[in-house]
Amino acid sequence: MITLTRIERTALAQGWHRLLDDVLSNGRPVDLPIRLRLSEGESLHHVSAAFALQRVCELSYALCPLAQALADDLLSAQEDDGSFGSVAATSAVVRALLDLRAMPGAEALAERLEFAVEHALRFLAQQQDEEGLLGGSEIDSAIALWQLGGRAEFAAAVRLDELVEAVGATRWRCLAPRPVSAA
């Protein structure tokens, strides 16, 4: 079982591949093509930190120094266009920031989190093509649904029904949670 100490040690050592492996091995099995997409290039750092922050939020009852450090790292990495690199990385980071926002003690970060989430959701909405896919990619779209499909903020930002339909016709639909309707 992964612990906060193990996450912290691995993050401090910048062992991004190991951190991603550790965090993913504690959850739903991930098909190789999706694992490869999550670990591509410069996005690996953001994806690993985002998944680590998601796990820290699950293991902690309130904002802790590790969650604060991971959040600061991610918030400083946001691009001018609102992304955190790829569509997949941006989806994972948004999920982590939404999880963090719900934690007791995160009130001091509320304004920064809100701005980053809104900016990233705008980026994701701009990536949606006429078929409903994000970035024209079935894998990226499936990852976005896996990470954000159940979040009302995401449902309000993208054309969720079109995204679900576009991904639903692919083999990646197993990742998608039951999406919520835009309110």
Image (cartoon, rainbow, N blue to C red):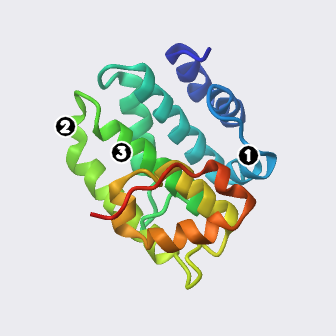
The residue under label 2 is: 108
The residue under label 3 is: 98
Q: Which mark is residue 75?
A: none
Query: Please, what secondary structure does the residue beneath circle 1 have?
Result: helix
Q: Earlier in the sequence, mark 2 or mark 1?
A: 1
Q: Nearer the viewer, residue 14 or 52?
A: 52
Query: Please, what secondary structure does the residue beneath circle 2 have?
Result: helix
View extreme (right): residue: 32
Q: Amino acid at mark 2?
A: Ala
Q: Position of residue 173 (x, y in %)?
A: 65, 56
Marks 2, 1: nearer the viewer: 1
Marks 3, 2: nearer the viewer: 3
Q: Amino acid at mark 1?
A: Arg
Q: Position of residue 108 (x, y in %)?
A: 19, 37
On screen, 138 above or below 89? below
Kindly indicate whether the residue at mark 1 contacts the one at mark 3 (C-beta within 8 angstroms). no
Q: Residues within 10 Å of mark 3 (few under 14, many from 20)?
A: some
Query: Please, what secondary structure does the residue beneath circle 3 have?
Result: helix
Q: Amino acid at mark 3?
A: Leu
Q: Position of residue 15 (x, y in %)?
A: 67, 31
Q: Earlier in the sequence, mark 3 or mark 2?
A: 3
Quadrant location, the N terminus: top right
View extreme (bottom): residue: 130
Q: Residues within 10 Å of mark 2 (few under 14, many from 20)?
A: few
